[in-house]
Amino acid sequence: MSLSGMRGLSMFISDVRNCQNKEQERLRVDKELGNIRTKFKNEKNLSPYEKKKYVWKMLYIYMLGYDVDFGHMEAISLISAPKYPEKQVGYIVTSSLLNENHDFLRMVINTVRNDIIGRNETFQCLALTMVGNIGGREFAESLAPDVQRLLISSSCRPLVRKKAGLCLLRLYRKNADVVNIDGWSDRMAQLLDERDLGVLTSVMSLFIALVSNNTEAYWNCLPKCVKILERLARNQDVPQEYTYYGIPSPWLQVKTMRALQYFPTIEDPNTRRSLFEVLQRILMGTDVVKNVNKNNASHAVLFEALALVMHLDAEKEMMSQCVALLGKFISVREPNIRYLGLENMTRMLLVADVQDIIKRHQAQIITSLKDPDISIRRRALDLLYAMCDITNAKDIVEELLQYLSTADFAMREELALKAAILAEKFAPDLSWYVDVNLQLIDKAGDFVSDDIWYRVVQFVTNNEDLQPYAAAKARDYLDKPALHETMVKVSAYILGEYSHLLARRPGCSPKEIFAIINDKLSTVSPPTVAILLSTYAKILMHTQPPDSELQEQVWAIFRKYESYIDVEIQQRAVEYFALSRKGAALVDILAEMPKFPERQSALLKKAEDTEVDSAEQSAIKLRSQQQMSNALVVTDQHPPSASVPVSQPGPVKVPSQNLEGSSPDQGMPKVNGTVDKIDTQPIPSADLLGDLLGPLAIEGPPGTTPSEEQNPISGYEAAPNSADALALSTLTEESDAVQPIGNVADRFHALCLKDSGVLYEDPYIQIGLKAEWRAHHGRLVLFLGNKNTSPLVSVRALILPPAHLKMELSMVPETIPPRAQVQCPLEVVNLRASRDVAVLDFSYKFGTIAVNIKLRLPAVLNKFLQPISVSAEEFFPQWKSLSGPPLKLQEVVKGVKPMPIPELANLFTNLQLAVTPGLDTNPNNLVASTTFFSDSTKAMLCLIRIETDPSDRTQLRLTIASGDPALTFELKELIKEYMISVPTASPVPTPSPAPLQPQLLPVADPNDPGAMLAGLL
Amino acid sequence: MGIRFVLLVNKQGQTRLAQYYEYLTLDERRALEGEIVRKCLARTEHQCSFVEHRNYKVVYRRYASLFFLVGVDNDENELAILEFIHLLVETMDRHFGNVCELDIMFHLEKAHFMLEEMVMNGCIVETNKQNILTPIQLMDKTS
């Protein structure tokens, strides 16, 4: 085979192939794009051959994933070329590059129409294909009648008619109102008499679309479909070229049976008999053969036949045949067949009453739940969920619970939700229900949504018999060493309400209950602290006569939290303190929660899968929806959260002196805050890294692998040449003893733009970080993971906050046990705008090695931004009212890393600046807005405008406006830092950027007065 | 039921052919290709040929260094698609003779023409190899 007819294209493809890395490839592609652009500028001098060549290059470049934002006109213009090769390229490339709404398409409608109604068959085919792939409304309006005529024309050859069939399908699907299909039932019946299998294959797709919208109108076509199926199944009059491994077009067989599934039943006895004969043949006559392709093809037909039998709800005899077949399939080794067996069993449960037969296979299905293949596990889970009822709920739910501890992260959430729903739907008794849910929270706390524990509370509150049992269970869980925070919440809530029911049991006196709950106080986040405070108040209330010692303990805690930075907690502490001094009145005020009004489960609603928007509503789904409609539950949006008495956040403002007073030592470093208990979690698996970051990894969007999330930067690429990496990395005393793994600076920069990841790692310890930001508050959690089998000792953590941040590190234990992970929450309050950076001075000893590291913490300016979209009516008055310095600053920034506008917009989005397209009519400009939060400014709107110069991408004009001079300045500097590619004073340029984000980040310049370390050094 | 896209990707994750039957922006394509290629490449031959991704399925098949990935709606007949991939490969084979990755790479346009004859608007339109190859042979003759 010679190389492609186009030498230039082959050369280019070969060049790209020889590129050593992505960067080289980008350079080569950019060069080519420049070349094509120049050529297209002098279009007149181009021969059709050259045009064709360049257009193919464009398509190739586009396929590689590069933006090709020019040359569309040249591609489209080829459609009008007189010769076949150019025209063909024009049509194909146009339908690959453009979408149906592209303006340019309008210009060729006439040419396309001329090709369609013309006499050249090959031109007709090309035009029909393009319209069939991307034809939009205007095409439908001007072409539909022509296309219909071609489809039914007797003078047209099959090759044109099959294209016309699918072209019409597109026009009909997209614009059913434009395409006139009155009287088409007769025409369809005629079309289904067609002998040519290519035309039939096309027409059958069109028929499926029509019949799925209106079954009634197409009854007359039903016998025709059966005839086609008979013809294929009996291999009558099927040309050799349409036979695939001895099977007459399996694809057409599948399509035909799919079409038949849209008819609710078959009334005519003759048609019915014929169809069932065919189906019976398929069901009985499909054997397993050696040839894989033949096997697959015959089973494709078989599975479709199964679906059709299920749908027609045939005589029980055939249905049990189906179940038997499926039962066989789910136990074979061949994974494809097993997968499909499980999938079809699930479908079968939706349409037929076969629960009892399928239950016989329960053990087999549970085996598949442990298959190494996640596709199969998912199918098994779905099937178990579908086949669960009151008789087997206990077994199935217990299997799911057991599997939960080993299941992969990708499935845990779904698994937990399904187990919770089944437990609720089919609980044989209520104590079992409580057991299951507490186990769920215990085993998979991170994957259990709040809905689940709210629901537990609701159940317990509404069932008096259950209360002592639940309280005892909750008490037991609190004895466990490492407890998920959700478990702390639910246990504390239940014990607050009902622990007095346990009072006579050993270890359950109010004082003991209080002590064991209070153990957790220092380890939990503010929402849980709020719940614990309520629990304490409730315990006090239940303790009659009052125990003065307990009272003192609880009051001490209330007083401590009276000046806490979180408003909600502060308010609770103040109020409970006041209330608990009211004596007997307390019993009325804090009485037990009344029963909740009966509600339907919010969980069920959640379980509804996001519906698939397939072109046609599938027959099975339609049916099952009709059957299930009364099982679906509509709930209001609010989860039954009345369980937590929450005061309305919002109008309550914290007096600022109060905040000041809360921690007089704000600016001072904090060492090892009080620790009552170390939250150690034994790490069983050898894969420490994975386990350490387990909770972080799932934060990523579904589908990204955890490993990528954790290590966004390849360590080897950047390590040696970042100036500030050296300034900050480890190394004090024994400088060559411990080297960090990965680049510390890069890790910091990556965390500036996202909220979870690894902050630091060396051979002994890994410090992970997870942050949440709300207005001017932030909560960081440091995950200190000991990677070794011996403990890390003399662990010390000092926070060196810059003047504009208040930071409070809650607890760092002296020792981190072997292979344990310790979580240290760190509260942050932003007082005003500044780019200074907080530093964590961290040290530990491992054997004789002492390590001291200073790490910048990513509590940076952009974390206190919240993107906000502003309309033109709001933007312009603001923009005008903030006139001139110091509120509005403008600067021409030079030496900018050249970025196309979308990339710039992307950078803005990452920085929490909301880009508002359309506000600035010039496409080279970018306008964005955001809200900045700090204690001094409260919420403050910031407006940003960037004007780029298309002829010189290395410079741009930046204008920032806000109501605070410091904020305007700091934000301007921040954005500048991100746009300038190479720091001015750095002797070594950053390594060549790989395609991913992090390299965009500038390396902070240590000599810059605004440099992040100023506060420290 | 319908085909959403056909992708040919080699073991290194380089795209060799991409045809979408619903419009996706370049960013969406990049993301999708990255995600599903990573998922599929990580699988062993003992696992099934179907991968569930977001709200659709990918049916895939491997030939030497090249993966053929077809994105389909959830209710599509998976085995029919699996064999459709093989039909595509056999058609290419008939045209190129012992087709390999390089043939497809350097004859991108022909690979496109074949696919275009076989799938239109996400529906299988032709499965007769001779009919599929006729336009290409016509073109070879004229050029």
Image (tube, rainbow, N blue to C red):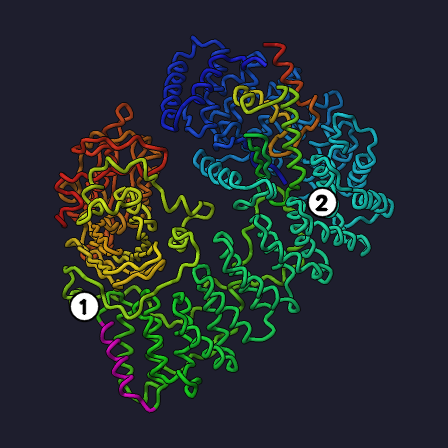
| Residue closer to the observer: A169 or A481 | A481
In the rendered structure, which segment of residues is drawn in magenta? Answer: A545-562
Query: Which residue type does callout 1 highlight?
Result: Ser
Q: Quadrant of residue A175?
A: top right
In the figure, is residue A796 to the left or right of B38? left
In the rendered image, residue A563, in percent from the top left (x then y), is placed at 21, 70
Q: Quadrant of residue A12?
A: top left
| Residue closer to the observer: A389 or A812 | A812
Number of labels in the image equals 2
Q: Which residue is mark 1?
A: A662
Whichever of labels 2 and 1 marks the residue nearer the N terminus, that label is 2
User: On residue A303, which mark appears?
Assistant: 2
In the figure, is residue A429 to the left or right of A210? left
In the rendered image, residue A502, in percent from the top left (x then y), is placed at 43, 84
In the rendered image, residue A52, in percent from the top left (x then y), is placed at 50, 15
In the rendered image, residue A872, in percent from the top left (x then y), is placed at 31, 42
In the figure, is residue A292 to the left or right of A488? right
Chain assignment, label 1: A
Q: Tell me if residue A360 comes above or below residue A908 in the rendering.
A: below
Q: Tell me if residue A203 comes above or below residue A342 in the rendering.
A: above
Chain assignment, label 2: A
Q: Residue at x 43, y 8 (%)?
A: A45
Query: Which residue type does callout 2 highlight?
Result: Phe
Q: Residue at x 47, y 53 (%)?
A: A409
Residue A125: say if magenta: no
Q: Secondary structure at mark 1?
A: helix
Q: Secondary structure at mark 2?
A: helix
Q: Looking at this view, name the residue that lies furthest to the front.
A: A848
Q: Residue at x 44, y 30 (%)?
A: A65
